Each structure stands twice: as structure tokens, then as C-alpha cells.
């Protein structure tokens, strides 16, 4: 029996092989075309994204977005594109930059907190500490906006530093120890306790980093203090301190006792700008330092006080 000749078998299968080669070539061509189209689409999408990003991040578009954000959050008037200044006075009230808070112009016992669903961003943060400063049932309309009325609700001792210490600790229980430290009053070593003695307070007032003047800006729970830079003489109060309970942009809301006011049986709320007087701002908007520097300047006028920040001790 003869074996089949290999060449003969190849010749007989050639037409089928040619058909297979043609089909493979066609299939390969289709896949190549599909791949080419996919690459083209990918490149086009990438170019479109780059173009979109370039436009979106262009200075003009960024400026427009910032302008719109300012209008929406209330820091810019959509009507006339005029900046809303730092806290303003109107109808007997000081009203904070974004209208979140209001206090009586002559420092009263009520803090008005924006709570108006008809106003963009119409719910302001509640003052802190919540255990001591609480909302009542009454509301007030100020400048066409609705405000909740908050007041101090616990035991009160009319001592400015002792009360600021209690606010920092979130309690109405007085402490026998100094509870607040003077921020950055030492170049080396820990910050000293404030209120230990008139002598130490005067040293703190004259330390190079403590006095921030009009730039003093405590956080919520911290306190301002304006302190004499020379030891007080008989009849002079040595300092004034005030705890910050709320903030709105450059404006700080404080709650304050004042031992020099013997008739005060409740703390008062007040509001201070943190923008120095050499920056454009509306009439009547002043910093804590401006409010008290005259009172705590020495009698001969030669020694101005220092204003800085007090914070709760951690030990």
C-alpha cells in the first residue's frame, strides 16, 4: 500500500487554505479599522477634555465662579456688586458681615442668631458653649431677617477673667486656679498663666510676641484681653477679658462680664471687627483693641496697653 504523496495532498487543500487566508485577512482588517476608530475617538475625547479644562480654569471663568460664590454666600451684593463690609450698625444693632449674628449696639443680654429659611444660608451656627448659651422661644426680625434669641442661662459671676475662664471650660462653676494662658508670651518655654498677679500680667503685656493689638483674633472658646503695660495704680482696673462664642468672617461675637459695672447681673454680648483701622471699613466697626486701648492706657498717656489672646490651659 502506497503512502499518499505530501505534495499531492497540499495541492488538493490549497483552495481551502486560500479561502481561510482571505477570511483571516478580512477579519484582521476589520479589527484594525475598529482599533483605529477607537484610538481616534479616544484622542478626540482627550482633546475635548483638555479644551474644557483649559476653558474652565481660565482666569475669566475662575473669576466668574468666585463672583457667583460670593453672591450666593452673601459676601457680595448681587444687586450692585458692592462688597458687604465688616459688621455694620443698623436700627440699633451691630450686624455681622454675612448677617449671621446681631447684638444690641449698646451691648445687651441677647445674641440674635440668623434662623430664616427665606434667606440663602439662612441658619447660622449656634454660639458655643451650647450648655451655657441657649436659644429661647422668641424670635426677632432685624433688617428683614428672622433671628433666634440666645442668652446666657446659668449662674453668673461678674468678673471678666473668671467668666472668660468658665466659658473656655464650658461650665458655670468658678475655679480657684488660673485657667487661661497668654498665647506666645515667651520666646522660650511654655506660655504663662494670665491673672496670677498684676506683676506677671504686666510682664506678659510687655513680652514681644504677645501684643497683637488690632490683629488679635481669638478662636471660639478663647478670649481677648487688653492689659496695662505698667502696673495699675489705686483705682485702676488692670485688664479686660472677653470670651469669643461665635465668628462670622472677620467679626467676633463675645460674651463679657465687667467687675467695674457693679450693677451688671448678666453678661452682655458684643461684636468686634478683626480688621485693623488702616484697612477700609465702615464707620463704627472697631477692633477689641480699639474699644479698650484708651481705657487701659496709663494716666500720663505714655504707656499704651497690649491686646492678645488667652487660651485654656491643657494641664
Image (cartoon, rainbow, N blue to C red):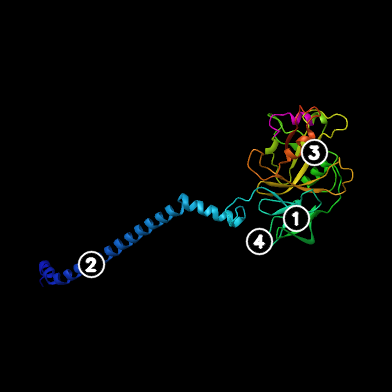
Dot in front, 2 or 1: 1
Q: Is residue 205 above or below residue 70?
A: above
- Disc 3/disc 2 C-alpha distance (Å): 92 Å
Q: Which SS class for mark 4?
A: loop
Element under label 2?
helix
Tell me what residue is drawn at x 24 percent, y 65 percent. 29
Q: From the viewer's perspective, is 262 left or right of 180?
A: right
- Decide: few, some or many residues near mark 3? Use Cα within 10 Å; few <14, some 14-19, many ≥20: many
Q: CA distance from mark 4 to mark 2?
A: 70 Å
Report if the CB atoms under discs 4 and 1 are less than 8 Å apart: no
**Image spot of residue 116 (x, y percent):** 69, 62
Q: Which residue is mark 4?
A: 119
Which of these two is toward me, 24 or 195?
A: 195
Q: Quadrant of the C terminus?
A: top right
Q: Which residue is mark 2?
A: 24
Q: Secondary structure at mark 1?
A: strand
Mark 3 or mark 4: whose residue is earlier in sequence: 4
Disc 4 crowd, CA 10 A, few/some/many (<14, 14-19, 20+): few
User: Viewer-proximal residue, 8 or 136?
Assistant: 136
Q: Give the residue number, with chain letter if any, for mark 3.
A: 240
Question: From the image, which quarter does the N terminus lie in?
Answer: bottom left
Q: Residues within 10 Å of mark 1 (few under 14, many from 20)?
A: many
Please give the range of residues in magenta.
201-211
Q: Earlier in the sequence, mark 4 or mark 1?
A: 1
In-front residue for pair 301/175? 301
Q: Between disc 4 and disc 2, whose residue precedes?
A: 2
Q: Is residue 130 left or right of residue 61?
A: right
User: Mark 4 against mark 2, which lies toward the viewer?
Assistant: 4
Point 45% across, 51% down: residue: 58
Quarter occupied by residue 189: top right
Which numbered disc covers residue 112?
Answer: 1
Amino acid at each position: 500500500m502506497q503512502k499518499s504523496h505530501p505534495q499531492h495532498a497540499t495541492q488538493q487543500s490549497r483552495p481551502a487554505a486560500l479561502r481561510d487566508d482571505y477570511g483571516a485577512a478580512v477579519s484582521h482588517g476589520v479589527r484594525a479599522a475598529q482599533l483605529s476608530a477607537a484610538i481616534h475617538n479616544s484622542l478626540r475625547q482627550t482633546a475635548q477634555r483638555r479644551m474644557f479644562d483649559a476653558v474652565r480654569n481660565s482666569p475669566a471663568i475662575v473669576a466668574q465662579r468666585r463672583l457667583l460664590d460670593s453672591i450666593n454666600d452673601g459676601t457680595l451684593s448681587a444687586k450692585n456688586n458692592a462688597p458687604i463690609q465688616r459688621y455694620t450698625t443698623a436700627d440699633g444693632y451691630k450686624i455681622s458681615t454675612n448677617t449671621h449674628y446681631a447684638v444690641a449696639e449698646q451691648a445687651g443680654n441677647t445674641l440674635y442668631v440668623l434662623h430664616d429659611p427665606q434667606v440663602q444660608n439662612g441658619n447660622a451656627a449656634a454660639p458655643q458653649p451650647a450648655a451655657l448659651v441657649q436659644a429661647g422661644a422668641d424670635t426677632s426680625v432685624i433688617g428683614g431677617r428672622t433671628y433666634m434669641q440666645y442668652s446666657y442661662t446659668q449662674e453668673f459671676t461678674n468678673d471678666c477673667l473668671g467668666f472668660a475662664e468658665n466659658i473656655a471650660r464650658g461650665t458655670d462653676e468658678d475655679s480657684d486656679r488660673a485657667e487661661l494662658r497668654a498665647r506666645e508670651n515667651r520666646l522660650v518655654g511654655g506660655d504663662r498663666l494670665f491673672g496670677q498677679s498684676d506683676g506677671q500680667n504686666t510682664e506678659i503685656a510687655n513680652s514681644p510676641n504677645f501684643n497683637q493689638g488690632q490683629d488679635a483674633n481669638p478662636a471660639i472658646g478663647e478670649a481677648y484681653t487688653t492689659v496695662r503695660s505698667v502696673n495699675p495704680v489705686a483705682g485702676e482696673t488692670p485688664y479686660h477679658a472677653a470670651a469669643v462664642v461665635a465668628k462670622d468672617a472677620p467679626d467676633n461675637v463675645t460674651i463679657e462680664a465687667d467687675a467695674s459695672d457693679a450693677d451688671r447681673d448678666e453678661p452682655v454680648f458684643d461684636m468686634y471687627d478683626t480688621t485693623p483701622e488702616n484697612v477700609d471699613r465702615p464707620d463704627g466697626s472697631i477692633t477689641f483693641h480699639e474699644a479698650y486701648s484708651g481705657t487701659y492706657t496709663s494716666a500720663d498717656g505714655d504707656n499704651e496697653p497690649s491686646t492678645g489672646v488667652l487660651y485654656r490651659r491643657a494641664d
